[in-house]
Image (cartoon, helix red, strand yellow):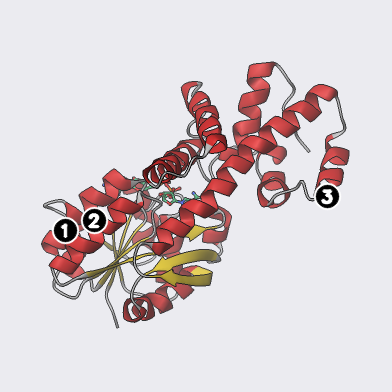
Amino acid sequence: MARIGFIGLGRMGRPMASNLRKKGFELAVYDVDPAGVRPLAELGATDAASAAEVARQSDIVFTMLPGSPEVEATVLGKDGLIANGRAGLLIVDMSTIDPRTTDRIAQAARDSGMSVVDAPVGRLASHADRGECLFMVGGSVDDVARVQPMLQAMGSTIHHCGDVGTGIRTKLVNNYLAVVSCQLNAEALALSQRFGLDLHKTLEVIHGTTATNGQLKIAWPAKVLAGDIEPGFAIDLAHKDLTLILTAANDQRVPMPVAAAAREAYSMARAARWGRKDFSAMVDVLCDQAGIEKPRL
Ligand code: NAD
């Protein structure tokens, strides 16, 4: 059986690694924060001292880290996976990062006789808890076949998008719609609140027309509209994704004026210290600024 490593045990990585362990995979885990490691150690995972140790103990290593700098350090650093792994090591990065970083780590892996699959994750943290992630996967047919059993242990939907790098690019397209939807919803519901409309009735109308979206219909009733603004998916991470999207779009000469405006709304939320709250709380940020009662069901 392949020996599995897992690095990055935060809101997403912790339940995903737990699902691997519960389904019988041997795991060596690492996170800079010991609080992430503890629940995995209780499930019988090996508590590794570093990314280098994970690399030495594994045939396949999964990473679920905040962004590009952490992935670069973990994969390319002198104490990282490529410097310490054996030829044949397969690195599966599931973080949402700059596609150029994915291209760079894939090239570095190839140069060392290793390989990379990018498998960023769609859906919500609550899906990760239940083992119902959606994966957008980029990689060779053989590499993707090798990781299929583990992806199935963590998720319920797997899309093979093409060669390495296509998963993360698909993810940016997906998250553009999800993250901007939250800002759109925030403005719409703030207006509804200011008008003094009944929130239930407003939602009933919106959900019966083409105006609705998955954030408003599926995610928000269980998060901000229920008064729960703990992440979930943090405003800081949504801001990072919009920045990745704008950078990639600018690089390819694709103008995205709505994305640019929405990114600065997220910048304002972070400046007002909402960065660690769930991205559905964008409506609370706006209501706070405008002195409007926050919408709650
Ligand atoms: P998080 O901040 O909760 O977790 C990140 C973890 O990585 C933390 O435990 C942190 O201590 C650890 N870490 C940071 N640097 C490290 C390093 N150098 N070595 C080892 N561990 C390190 O973030 P999250 O919500 O779990 O998101 C992880 C990734 O998944 C992000 O790229 C995010 O954009 C993406 N994502 C998140 C969601 C979501 O709903 N939360 C959904 C899909 C994708």
Residue lying at 82% horizontally and 42% vertically, measured from the top left = 203
Residue lying at 64% horizontally and 28% vertically, measured from the top left = 284
Q: Quadrant of the C terminus?
A: top right
Q: In the displayed structure, would residue 71 be above or below residue 145?
A: above
Check disc 3 and give the amino acid type: Thr
Frontmost of labels 3 and 1 is 3
Q: Earlier in the sequence, mark 1 or mark 2?
A: 1
- Give how far across and how far down residue 4 sits, in percent: 29, 71
Q: Earlier in the sequence, mark 3 or mark 1?
A: 1
Left-right relation of 208 to 142: right
Question: Which residue is labeled 1 in the image?
Answer: 52
Q: What is the CA distance from the residue labelled 1 to the residue labelled 2?
A: 19 Å
Regarding mark 2 in the picture, which secondary structure is present there?
helix
Regarding mark 3 in the picture, which secondary structure is present there?
loop
Q: Earlier in the sequence, mark 2 or mark 3?
A: 2
Residue 49 visible from this viewpoint: no
Contact, mark 2 vs mark 3 (Cβ under 8 Å): no
Question: Which residue is labeled 3 in the image?
Answer: 209
Q: Is mark 1 within 8 Å of ligand 1?
A: no
Question: Which residue is labeled 2 in the image?
Answer: 104
Residue lying at 21% horizontally and 71% vertically, measured from the top left = 89
Q: Nearer the viewer, residue 131 or 267?
A: 267
Q: What is the CA distance from the residue labelled 3 to the residue labelled 1?
A: 53 Å
Q: Quadrant of the N terminus?
A: bottom left
Check disc 2 and give the amino acid type: Arg
Q: How dense is the environment of label 1, judged by Cα within 10 Å: few (below 14), some, or many (20 and up)?
A: many
